[in-house]
């Protein structure tokens, strides 16, 4: 790992990883979406009993920091595999979404979270 | 959008977007992890009654394709904001995870999904 | 509804409801578990940007109270249908779990949540 | 356990259990909703790589059967504690929902799942 990994390269490595282990039959979009949601829940689990302040300090404990980072990797891994299975470009999807949101949520906000 | 967006640039735009609307007080790591899991569930919802074959064909219906792509964007948006809040590099996290998994799951697999 | 509904009676009505609409082919345990998790996420969504204090006051707004109560019903509905599909008695399962937990978490606790 | 447990009795035992361990400060509605969704995801995890047929047969393996039953108990436990915290009657909520759904989904269905 001499240079910083890029998203497309990681996505390719995940695809090769699953192919080499014959996991593709399990990797239907339906199953990958479930797996993504399970990993997201494992991230939530770390925070479920914490106060907002405690939640902001999780990275100061090395073992919790490792656990959080690991769950982030799992969420991203399944998101990329899901996108690969369906031919979705996640970066283009997000760019388009941000542009739409700039229209939906004009700037002079009151501070009240409009998504709530 | 003349060139392809990159992850770091999108993460920056999301941060500016939230800051311009004074949403940071809501964006604790705990809340962002919850929001991420909610968006992942909205992706699952699209697939919940589909057979494996139907799930592989979701992109052939333009309106479902749009909905799936939109949820992918939402999941990625909250994942990037979560990482920004805690100083996590998602690409480095995933690269490290792939390397660990190459040790945990040696290649000559039987075809049975070992994560199951 | 002259008397208070009981769990077994509601479970029966849910089974008849699904059968009358020919929904059983969709109601595999796998799909019902997904649907349960989607409904649980819809409950989380109501709380995702709230402070702990705001979350304790959700029932004082009639429209939010209705939404919360409705999601509770959805979670319970899918849980009962899941149990029906697999022949699980949810009350016996919970009674057994409480007994095990009384052994796992002895009373003179320090106030720190041991599940965390 | 000489007689079959009832929902109200189990809910009372859960409340006493948490009170005896001073867990109430952690049991905000927001946190309980998160915990509920995490347990629902643990149920999903059991099924995530299974085919529909395999998912229907999970109870034939004693260790998987125990795991499934245990997760059902956890989901129900958090649902009851959530309802207790907010003063919601889950059985009345479900009875009302079934009545509304009988209006929303008239019987002579085509077999296509209208919730999808």
Image (spheres, coloured by chain):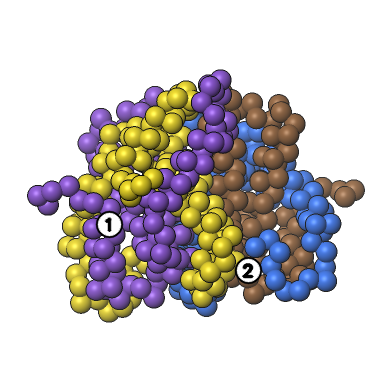
Chain colours: A brown, B blue, C purple, D yellow
Element type at marker 1? Answer: helix
Q: Measuring from the top left, give residue C112's x and y in whole percent.
A: 56, 24
Q: Nearer the viewer, residue D59 or A37?
A: D59
**Where on the picture, by quarter, is residue B14?**
top right
User: Which residue is located at x 70 percent, y 45 percent?
Assistant: A70
Q: Nearer the viewer, residue D62 or D90?
A: D62
Mark 2: few/some/many CA within 10 Å (<14, 14-19, 20+) = many
User: Which residue is located at x 24 percent, y 73 percent?
Assistant: C20
On the picture, is D103 further left or further right than B29?
left
On the picture, is B103 further left or further right than A33?
right
* Res D109 seen here: yes
Mark 1–mark 2 Cα distance, whole angstroms, equals 37 Å
- Residue underneath mark 2: A27
Q: Is there one chain holding both mark 1 and mark 2?
A: no
User: Which residue is located at x 40 percent, y 72 percent?
Assistant: C26
Chain ID of residue with mark 1: C
- Residue underneath mark 1: C8
């Amino acid at each position: 790992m001499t240079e910083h990994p890029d998203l497309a390269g990681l996505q390719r490595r995940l695809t090769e990883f699953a192919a080499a282990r014959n996991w593709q039959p399990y990797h239907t979009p339906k199953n990958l979406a479930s797996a993504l949601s399970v990993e997201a829940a494992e991230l939530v689990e770390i925070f479920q009993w914490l106060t907002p302040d405690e939640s902001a300090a999780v990275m100061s404990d090395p073992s919790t920091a490792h656990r959080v980072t690991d769950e982030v990797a799992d969420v991203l891994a399944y998101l990329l595999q899901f996108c690969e299975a369906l031919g979705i470009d996640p970066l283009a999807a997000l760019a388009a979404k941000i542009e739409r949101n700039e229209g939906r949520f004009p700037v002079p906000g009151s501070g009240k979270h409009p998504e709530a």
